[in-house]
Image (cartoon, rainbow, N blue to C red):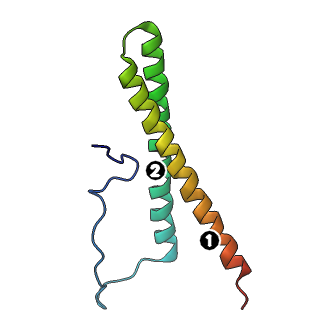
Amino acid sequence: MIQNTMFPTQAVQPLKMKESSQSDATPAESLNKFSSYLKDAIDQVAEQENASKEMNDKFTLGQANIDEVMIASEKALLSLQLTAQVRNKVIEAYQEIMRTQI
């Protein structure tokens, strides 16, 4: 079974309605949380790329099987493709907002 290691599923919590007694986060706090989430995701993509390079080096030295190398390479490739697609969607959403007339 293929698991997405870029965005861990156990960290996702179901949406809950906010109670009026709870204090809302400031925009700066929300921005910091979002930016740290994106940074963690990009760091995980970089880690998978480094793992793929290490597996290639081990294969060259005869310390790894081709199966392990291909799995590590595909994980890195899929993570990079997902990151590129998310980036494209963010840019598309930004452009759509800029085209909106007030």
The reply to whether residue 47 is visible in this rendering is no
Specify which label sits upstream in the sequence, 1 or 2: 2
The span from disc 1 to disc 2 (Cα, nearest Å) is: 20 Å
Kind of residue at disc 2: Ala
Q: Which residue is mark 2?
A: 41
Front in this rendered view, residue 45 or 27: 45
Which residue is depicted at the point 36% across and 24% down? 68
- Residue 89 at x, y percent in the picture: 58, 64
Query: Looking at the image, is mark 1 or mark 2 nearer the viewer?
Result: 1
- Where is mark 1, residue-wise? 93
Percent coordinates x, y for residue 61 in the rendering: 44, 8
Q: Is residue 92 above or below residue 65?
A: below
Residue 11 falls in image quadrant: bottom left
Q: Could you say whether the residue bearing mark 1 is in a helix, strand or loop? A: helix
In the image shown, does 38 or 80 lie closer to the viewer?
80
Identify the image quadrant of the N terminus.
top left
- Residue at the top extreme of this rendering: 61
The part of the image, by quadrant, that contains residue 85 is bottom right
Q: Position of residue 96 (x, y in %)?
A: 67, 76
Give the residue at x 59% y 64%.
Answer: 90
Identify which residue is drawn at 54% across, 58% down.
86
Instruction: Check the image and report above or below for 90 versus 76.
Output: below
Q: Position of residue 76 (x, y in %)?
A: 47, 37
Q: Amino acid at mark 1?
A: Ala
Query: Can see residue 41?
Result: yes
* Number of the label disc, if any, that sits on residue 31: none
Residue at x-position 47% and y-position 45%: 79
Question: How many numbered discs sit on the rendered protein?
Answer: 2
Relative side of 69 to 85, left or right: left
Residue 28 vs residue 99: left or right?
Answer: left
